């Protein structure tokens, strides 16, 4: 199985921490040049770049708010200027503003939809131009299991993640003949800062509902990204891969 990404260039949005950081570092370890997008955490993004460069790969930290079209256009342009091309886009940037729908403000709805769904669309649209010209590309959208199951208090987040699944399948149909694949990953509960803040009772409540009886790791998510970005996955497109330890079997 050929998972070497030497010579490829990737852009990971929201890559300064958590799952995005693990993905960016794994891409660098696989040999790809990696543009590390961040919105505010410049120091953290530079630390990710340093880790990528420790593997002998090239890294670049790029500030951009993916919800803003001018920021996205500039980010894609700067990536191509720095690396010469863009082959792999991982739409990972996401935020949460949780609350029951009946009490959810317009602002909390709009901010989550704009970052998590509009941002992925803007990045995809901008990245596709070069991918279509070079007739090779990989787009990987980070959805969530709640995009399929829903979740109380997360109407905005669940709607955005469900929207990513529709975006994935539609764009996959549009560009399949250009040797461009578009897939989504729908993680369940992954060990991150967010799950680390849960108390023991809350963590046990989660574990009782996961057949695998454990949380996933960011490294496991990153490994799937590497596979989907490689030539080994060239015949996989328009798919949603659930990584949830069996939480939501369907």
Image: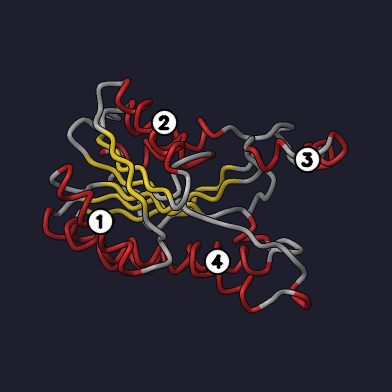
Q: Residue at x 67, y 50 (%)?
A: 248
Whether residue 12 can be seen here: yes
| Quarter of the rendering occupied by the N terminus | top left
Q: Position of residue 53 (x, y in %)?
A: 29, 25
Q: Quarter of the image holding residue 125?
A: bottom left
135 vs 125, left or right, is: left
> CA gap, disc 4 to disc 2?
29 Å
Q: Which residue position holds label 4?
A: 160
Q: Which mark is residue 231?
A: none
Q: Which residue position holds label 3?
A: 198
Q: Which residue position holds label 1?
A: 76
Q: Which residue position holds label 2?
A: 47
> CA gap, disc 3 to disc 2?
26 Å
> CA gap, disc 1 to disc 4?
23 Å
Q: Secondary structure at mark 1?
A: helix
Earlier sequence position, callout 1 versus callout 3:
1
In front: mark 4 or mark 2? 2
Q: Secondary structure at mark 3?
A: loop
Q: Quarter of the image holding residue 148?
A: bottom right
Callout 3 touching callout 2 (CB < 8 Å): no
Earlier sequence position, callout 4 versus callout 2:
2
104 vs 170, left or right, is: right
């Amino acid at each position: 199985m050929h998972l070497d990404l030497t010579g490829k260039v990737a852009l990971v949005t929201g890559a300064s921490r958590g799952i995005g950081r693990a993905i960016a570092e794994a891409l660098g370890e696989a040999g790809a040049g990696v543009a590390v997008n961040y919105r505010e955490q410049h120091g953290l993004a530079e630390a990710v770049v340093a880790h990528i460069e420790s593997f002998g790969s090239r890294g670049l930290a790029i500030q951009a708010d993916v919800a803003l079209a001018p920021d996205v256009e500039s980010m894609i342009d700067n990536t191509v200027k720095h690396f010469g091309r863009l082959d792999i886009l991982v739409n990972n940037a996401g935020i949460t503003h949780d609350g029951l729908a009946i009490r959810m403000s317009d602002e909390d709805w709009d901010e989550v939809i704009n970052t998590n769904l509009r941002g992925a669309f803007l990045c995809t649209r901008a990245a596709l131009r070069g991918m279509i010209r070079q007739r090779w590309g990989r787009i990987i959208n980070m959805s969530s299991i709640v995009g399929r199951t829903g979740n109380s208090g997360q109407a905005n987040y669940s709607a955005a993640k469900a929207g990513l699944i529709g975006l994935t399948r539609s764009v996959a149909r549009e560009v399949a003949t250009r040797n461009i694949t578009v897939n989504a990953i729908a993680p369940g509960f992954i060990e991150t800062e967010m799950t680390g803040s849960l108390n023991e009772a809350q963590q046990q409540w989660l574990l009782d509902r996961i057949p695998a009886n454990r949380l996933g790791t960011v490294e496991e998510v990153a490994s799937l990204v590497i596979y989907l970005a490689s030539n080994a996955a060239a015949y996989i497109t328009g798919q949603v891969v659930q990584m949830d330890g069996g939480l939501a079997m369907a």
